[in-house]
Amino acid sequence: MVYLSLFLTSFAAATLLPAYSEILTGTLVVQGYPMLWLWVWATLGNTLGSVVNGVIGRQIDRLKHKRWFPISEAQLHKARNSFNRYGQWSLLLGWLPLGGDALTLVGGVMRVPGSTLLCWWVLAKACAMHL
């Protein structure tokens, strides 16, 4: 049950939802849970949350003209320009607490192939657990 909680919290934290998995992860480390299993479940949850962002990103062009859509055309243009400038390497910053989730969304907006996105995200999320 502990690992499921960590997975779900990590999943939510990697989406655009306002959630943070660091407190739970830190608590579980202090309580003596094996680091390997904490790393596995947090990485899995974070990666799948990024996949959700990528799927949402792929739908942005279809949704951007809706009145309720929270991102302006100017913001999308800026994100596309930044991504074109820094390329796929910027996806490695998807682990950052501020802006990282937006990068995973941009990966979908830019239609980076799914297998490529998954490789970048797994690498970024897995390495972030060591910081």
Image: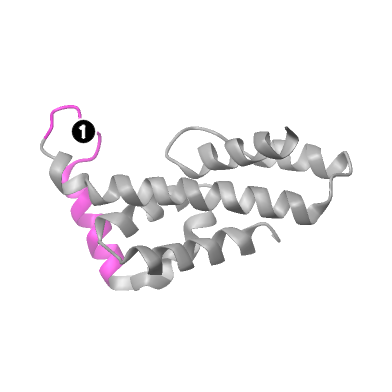
Q: How many marks?
A: 1
* Amino acid at the residue labelled 1: Phe
Q: Left or right of 7: which side holds 116?
A: left
- Residue at position x 19%, y 27% in the image: 68
As drawn, 77 above or below 89:
above
Q: Position of residue 120 (x, y in %)?
A: 47, 67
Q: Which residues are magenta?
A: 66-84
Q: Left or right of 65: which side holds 122?
A: right
- Residue at position x 49%, y 61% in the image: 121
As drawn, 72 above or below 39:
above
- Location of the N terminus by quadrant is top right
Tell me the quarter of the picture where residue 109 sits. bottom left
- Location of the C terminus by quadrant is bottom right
Q: Left or right of 4: which side holds 123?
A: left
> Toward the viewer: 47 or 104?
47
> Toward the viewer: 120 or 75?
120
> Toward the viewer: 40 or 80?
40
